[in-house]
Image (cartoon, helix red, strand yellow):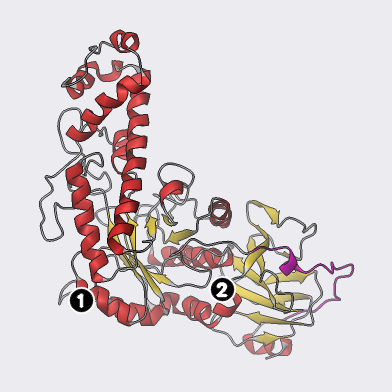
Amino acid sequence: MTFRDFAAWGMVVALFPAWTGAEEISLSSLVKPVVRPVGAPSQADIALSSRWPRPINAQDPHDALEAIQTFHADRMDWCYVGTNRAFVQMVKQTGLPLFGTISAELPDGPDVRTRLLGRDQTRTGDVVPNPELAFTVARGDVASVDYREVVMAHCRAMLDAGVAGIQVDDPGMTYHGAIYAEGGYGEASVAAFLSYLPTKTDAAERAQWGLPEILTGFDYRAYAEAKGADLPAPLKQLFLDFHRESLDDFYGWLRSALDAHAGRHVPLSCNNGSNQRQDETPYVKHFDFWVGETGLQYGDPTAKGIFSKSISAQALGKVQVYSPPNDGLDRIPTRAGYIDLTRKLIATGYACGSPTLVPWDVWRRGPETPRFFGTGEEFGDLYDFIDENRVLLDGYELGYAAGPGMAPWFIDGLDNAPVAVDEGVFVAVRALPGKPEAPMVIHLVDWREAGEALTLRIKWPAKSTRLLIPGRPAVESIGDVVRLPPLHPYGMVVMHP
């Protein structure tokens, strides 16, 4: 198609004179290859999470293998495969790597359901539950040798079944239990903390806090319960410092144990709670990439939020993958509203080089909110588009970005914006490092209300330009300034040098 064929879309396209004074610099000479950790998704990967092997039973209408085909998935992340070797092998036969999953509340073995070994406790001796769940599931104590063996038993089963890597759900484990859930008082952690205290304090400090000189065998849990709100602030901080170091030690041990068992580097990913958490413990030091849950409650699901966290992850040597919103019906009450926000997140993530998990088998908050299973009718056009244009995604790096609520971002050496677009539209300009002959790609994501046309101004010279919109035929030679049809919400303009 040419620009004249816009008429077939029911749109009026206006072309204007080309911009003058355009920069001659090549964006490909400015952008640098971003080293992505082993096992992390590429800029063009389509990642699906079947949270459990589906169908779970004969009554389950959802099929993971069908979803792989529907959305062109080329990897499966964050799946609680357990001992389901047959499912792992079925996924592998499709050519997809699969990441099995562990959490802070694993049962005592891959084939049992009890949760008794090496468990975390509160000061009153109660188990520490997952606050996001409506039922109580006892969490593990990462200082416990027993719980570490529980973790490795699950990991060995999954690695032996053929998983490519391990995803850790809620990786803060005992450390976060101590911060948010009054935990951290499991037997192993208390014993280790009493050994830790003399290395950080002297006898006079401990005496001032009412602690004995000899801490061996001291009932610290009862002491902390008796003190209650009067527990000395420095001691509280030391308790959290200990748990942070204990968690670091756990992941250092886990990394070594996984690699030793598999005889290779086993990629580790984690749910970093929301995409707001990146440079905290334990996300940076131990994991190859993160899968951050978005959502109105915690995750800043905006163009600015997705952009800033994608760039921040790259600066930290990681990749931030996004998971669709986990908000319940109280915050996103309609399916249409959920679909609209999720489509914008998917498009913005790919524009920033950070894939979003296919919105399929997504947990959403609240006992009345069912898991979300997106359909081909709702999201298929986006993933068809991504699959058809992988060559314009893979290896491309960001040179310029601007959008609602954010200051324009320029790669070092770029002084002027190569494009301009209407307010409310996110734009990212990407190029292949060191490939001046390759096209430059302008990503457009409309965060405004659906149905609005937009004006794009291309300020750099190009021999030819091509407009790509999901579900539409390509439009050739769109010119330098053009009124584009409504995007829903994604489109690309390809500039050939």
Image quadrant containing the C terminus:
bottom right
Side of 456 relative to 45 (left or right)? right
Nearer-the-camera pick, 293 or 154:
154
Q: Is residue 264 above or below residue 285?
A: below
Q: Decide: few, some or many residues near mark 2? Use Cα within 10 Å; few <14, some 14-19, many ≥20.
A: some
Q: Which residue lies at the image location 13% right of the left edge and 48% below the top edge?
A: 115
Q: From the image, give the main secondary structure of the stretch colored magenta.
A: loop
Q: Which residue is mark 1?
A: 86
| 16 in magenta | yes
Q: Position of residue 41 (x, y in %)?
A: 46, 67
Residue type, mark 1 in image: Ala
Nearer-the-camera pick, 474 or 28:
28
Q: Position of residue 380 (x, y in %)?
A: 44, 79
Cα–Cα span, label 2 and label 1: 31 Å
Q: Which residue lies at the image location 80% right of the left edge and 59% below the top edge?
A: 416
Magenta stretch bounds: 13-32
Q: Which residue lies at the image location 42% right of the left edge and 42% below the top edge?
A: 281
Nearer-the-camera pick, 111 or 178:
111
The answer to which image quadrant residue 466 occupies is bottom right
| 128 in magenta | no
Q: Decide: few, some or many residues near mark 1? Use Cα within 10 Å; few <14, some 14-19, many ≥20.
A: few
Side of 31 relative to 215 (left or right)? right
Q: Tag 1, which secondary structure?
A: helix
Q: Which residue is mark 2?
A: 394
Q: Tag 2, which secondary structure?
A: loop
**Residue 490: which numbered mark, if any?**
none
Side of 170 relative to 448 (left or right)? left
For marks 2 and 1, the one nearer the N-term is 1
